[in-house]
Image (cartoon, rainbow, N blue to C red):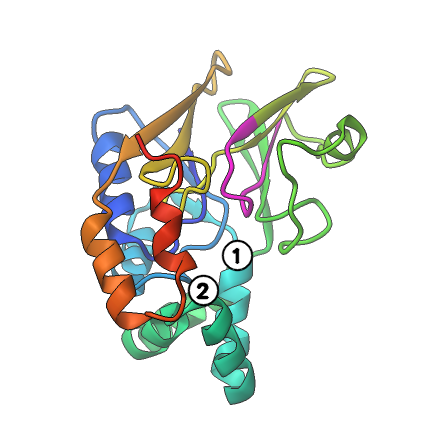
Amino acid sequence: MAVLSDLHANKYAVDAVFKDLDHESIDKILIAGDLIGYYYWPEDIVSRCMEDTRIACVQGNHEANLMRASADEKVRQQLKLEYGSGYEFCMADLSSHQLSWLENLKQSVVLDLAGTSFFMRHGTLKSQDEYLYPTATPDRLQSNYSDCDFTIFGHTHYPFIHHYDGKILLNPGSVGQPRDVGNLASYVIIDTVSRAVIFKRRMFETSQLVSLASSIDPENQYLRKIFSRAVL
């Protein structure tokens, strides 16, 4: 199985990861939220996730933000200043059926796969919009373990793994906006029989994305500068 998070409507990164998945024997794909937000191909990413029967998603804070932006023009403008035009593209490109699908994603899911249990939520046990970084204290990490064999979070865009009391806590990092190495999409493969965890990285094209972000959101430098962070 594969674990992904924070795709952020970045077609270049998502295509690179799914091309890699084609070479793996993947039976299930878990996505820990934030399919959309920041970038400009929400219809491509949402339709892919809706159509692939292997995929199980939870709602992230950007899906929640989209619903707020859709309901309130003032909120919409505030979010555009902070995150760029990603929500504008969602409202223009996504069908009512796709928007409803995003709105109705659960905030957390529990699954059993081949006798191994998984809990997945976007942020932490308590909130979809709270950060749990790999630098968190041992007490804070331990307090965010679920009762399942694996507890999966996204949101930080930093991959990490932690072991405690025979269980595993992990974050697969971000596919669409990695914040440790800007041009390397990050995800995880788990063997549900052996419980082996493999962190994978795939390089994706950034120059066209940076050019597009410069054109669409020239005032938001973060949208393009993040892709030059510690690049390989």
Q: From the viewer's perspective, is residue 198 above or below residue 109?
A: above
Residue pictured at 23% horizontal, 39% vertical = 16
Regarding residue 104, the answer to whether it shows in the image is no
Residue type (three-letter) at the residue carrying disc 1:
Gln
Q: Which residues are magenta?
A: 150-160
Query: Hey, which residue is sitting farthest top in the picture?
Result: 194
Q: Residue under circle 2?
A: 102
Q: From the viewer's perspective, is residue 218 above or below residue 156?
A: below
Instruction: Reply yes or no: does residue 98 show up in magenta.
Output: no
Regarding residue 22, the answer to whether it shows in the image is yes
Question: Are dots 2 and 1 in contact, CB under 8 Å?
Answer: yes
Which numbered marker is on residue 68?
none
The picture places residue 61, in percent across and down from the top left corner, at 55, 60
Residue pictured at 43% horizontal, 65% vertical = 101
**Label 1 neighbour load within 10 Å: few <14, some 14-19, many 20+:** many
Report how far apart the C-alphas of labels 2 and 1 lie in the structure.
7 Å
- Main secondary structure of the magenta stretch: loop
Q: Residue under circle 1?
A: 59
The picture places residue 15, in percent across and down from the top left corner, at 23, 44
Q: Name the image quarter holding the N terminus.
A: top left
Residue type (three-letter) at the residue carrying disc 2:
Leu
Q: Is residue 76 left or right of residue 132?
A: left
